[in-house]
Image: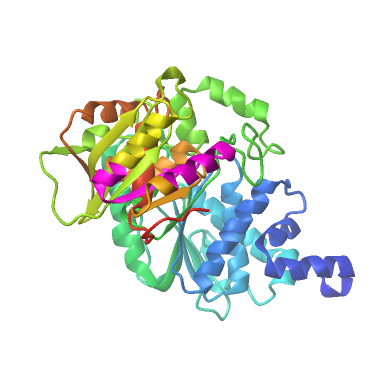
Amino acid sequence: MSWENVDIVEEAKIRASQRNLWDFRQFQHPNLIPGWFPRVLSGKIQQFWNDLQAGKRPIYIICTPPQHGKSSAITDAVAWIAGQDPSKKVIFASFSDRLGVRTNLALQRIFDSERYQLTFPKTKINQANIVTVSSQHRRNSELLEYVDQEGYFRNTTVGGPITGESLDIGIIDDPIKGRAEAQSETIRNKTWDWLMDDVFSRFSDKAGLLLVMTRWHVDDPAGRLLANRDDVTLIRFPAIAETDDEYRRAGEALFPEFKSLDFLLERQAERGAASWASLYQQRPVVEDGNMFRPQNIEIVHALPHGIAWVRGWDLAATRKDGDWTVGAKLGQKDDVTYIADLQRTQGGPEDVERLIVQTAQLDGCRQSIPQDPGQAGVAQMNYLSKKLQGLSFSFSRETGDKATRAEPFAAQVNVGNVRMLRASWNEALLDELRSFPFGKHDDIVDACSRAYNELGTTWDYKELL
């Protein structure tokens, strides 16, 4: 194929490929299986690139189930980025040297292809990367440099050496091999130390990190990044949708054109709840099946001074099955989150409203209240707004599923950054944390998650309608 033989349709595809990663992938791989998932995944990776170009120093974590095409998407993205700016220095790492070499060789095939050269004719592999082995010439499987450019692609293993030069983009594809290694605290610590000491220390001023992985453990690199930094973008693709979203309804498969719902349900039936939740739903749980490590919460006899408090509420949807309305009071100081109080009732609507008003008056702190959908929720909001006049409060609708909302709070619990005041409600809270998200009740977790997610926000008063 050459420009002399390119028709109008092909030229349009080439122009689109230069601008858009998903178009590039389809042009480079005519047999690529289409679907909303690979298109959206490509779009998320391109947004990472856009943020990098804007100088935002992006840190993206993209979590997908196994065998859904994430590695091929990353390979294509590296090639596309090299076409956009061949001066960029890219370091690629995975748990396996085999995966790094495979990615390197796949890139060589893309760079040498006619379709790529039509799309990005200025990006070529430097012939200096050819080495001689027993009179045979072959490409270096660890380094690809670009002709007349400063940029390169270098692949290594997690824990392996990183070039002494700075890097512009760090890409890590599955930093941990599997569940056996994920269960080893020693391996998790070594992986984390390598990420902090070797990778981040090589970043140029405007560098970014793209971590694409299947989750195995709450304390994996993704979990630690989320617990220790507030500038991380988490993108999670569960194998089977847990709620309705922009692309699919609850219960639908992620990539049905490639992995059918029947196939996924078979995998689910083969696995325990914890294994399915972490490996396929990208919601890692601790070994006994929950999201939290409640043993890491320190119980204290007194609270420090100078804390701004928020009380988050969870309103019982029904009085059946012992549902509770819960108000959890949380605050932060010196990167530690404190749980100061829980208020609960299993009463009817009038009891709930009375508890919220009385608690807010005694608290003197911000109240974050969920607004239930429908007319009943509007009526309750209007009633409480009148009763809470002069106090600091806000209503907002819940977005996302319960476990997703709980993840930031769970991350802090699991790394030991949460303490709670000794009180009669301690055991109820710990019991619910131990069983979440598979337990019968989640009212306390919902309230704590709402309060924690409100901490640090800047609203002062009420937002009614």
Q: Percent position (x, y) of residue 99?
A: 51, 48
Q: Is 431 situated above or below 243?
A: above
Look at 34% across and 33% down and name the residue there: 444
Taking depth in this image into account, of 240 and 104 the one nearest to the observer is 240
Q: Residue furthest top?
A: 321
Quadrant of the drawing holding the N terminus: bottom right
Q: Is residue 407 visible?
A: yes
Magenta segment boundaries in residue numbering: 359-385
Is 432 positioned to the left or the right of 172 in the image?
left
Q: Is 271 situated above or below 40?
A: above
Residue 356 sits inside the magenta stretch = no
Q: Percent position (x, y) of residue 70?
A: 57, 48
Q: Percent position (x, y) of residue 218?
A: 36, 39
Is 373 positioned to the left or the right of 25 in the image?
left
Taking depth in this image into account, of 304 and 29 the one nearest to the observer is 304
Taking depth in this image into account, of 149 and 247 the one nearest to the observer is 247
Q: Is 291 situated above or below 141?
A: above
Quarter of the figure with residue 268:
top right
Quarter of the figure with residue 313:
top left
Q: Is residue 136 visible?
A: no
Taking depth in this image into account, of 112 and 140 the one nearest to the observer is 112
Q: Percent position (x, y) of residue 340?
A: 21, 42
